Image (tube, rainbow, N blue to C red):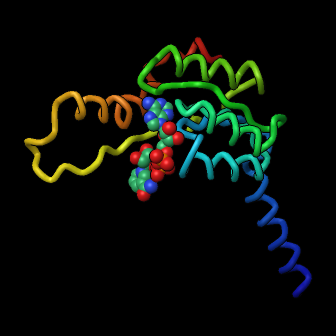
Amino acid sequence: MKAMVEDVSVNIIRLVLCRLEGKVAVITGGASGIGKRTAEVFAQHGAKVVIADIQDELGHSVAESIGPSTCCYVHCDVTDEDQVKNAIHRAVETYGKLDIMFNNAGIADPNKHRIIDNDKADFERVLAVNVTGTIIIYFINYNLCY
Ligand SMILES: NC(=O)c1ccc[n+]([C@@H]2O[C@H](COP(=O)([O-])OP(=O)(O)OC[C@H]3O[C@@H](n4cnc5c(N)ncnc54)[C@H](O)[C@@H]3O)[C@@H](O)[C@H]2O)c1
């Protein structure tokens, strides 16, 4: 009975760990923080990863540390539709498909305690990255990707 329980446990763990095996993911904002760690964990679990970010030096070095056969970097500002299309093309060209789009890129400006100290341009920039930038993928014609 104990052996059977151990077998079942091992199979469950294997199933969970293999869920990303063979998957291809684009991770925006993958050069640092949560995105970087996600890229590392995805790769450890068998996924191919495209890091899409605006910090080129950092992005290249993270991709290099994960491993060139598993991960690559592409410059991509998520507020620019063409650059997002390019990141998707890069995933399909390099790894043959796209399974996962992790829209993680985001910014936070320094706190300004009084609302009148904020200006409209700052507000629009945050919205462009944190809101439009996370759903821009859905505005892109799907025929382009597949
Ligand atoms: N860390 C937290 O506690 C926390 C809490 C709530 C939400 N979040 C959200 O989670 C996400 C990741 O947070 P984090 O703490 O890892 O932040 P982070 O600043 O470490 O990483 C964000 C990454 O996004 C990239 N980025 C910024 N603007 C970009 C753009 N226009 N195009 C492409 N990439 C861009 C940055 O270069 C950076 O690599 C963000 O969207 C953030 O708002 C974080």
**Farthest residue, direction front:** 57
Q: Is residue 117 left or right of residue 125?
A: left
Is 107 or 133 nearer to us in this picture?
107
Which one is nearer the viewer's eye here, 110 or 25? 110
x, y percent for residue 131? 35, 35
Quadrant of residue 60 within the rendered picture:
top right
User: Residue farthest to the bottom?
Assistant: 2
Q: Residue at x 61, y 22 (%)?
A: 88
Say which of 36 and 92 sits in front: 36
* Outermost residue toward the left in this view: 116
In this picture, residue 132 sits left or right of residue 67: left
On the image, the x and y values in percent for residue 50 come to: 67, 33
Residue at 77% in and 52% down: 44
Front position in the image: 85 or 15:
85
Number of labels in the image equals 0
Res 104 visible = no
Q: Is residue 51 left or right of residue 43?
A: left
**Residue at horizontal 81%, vertical 41%?**
67
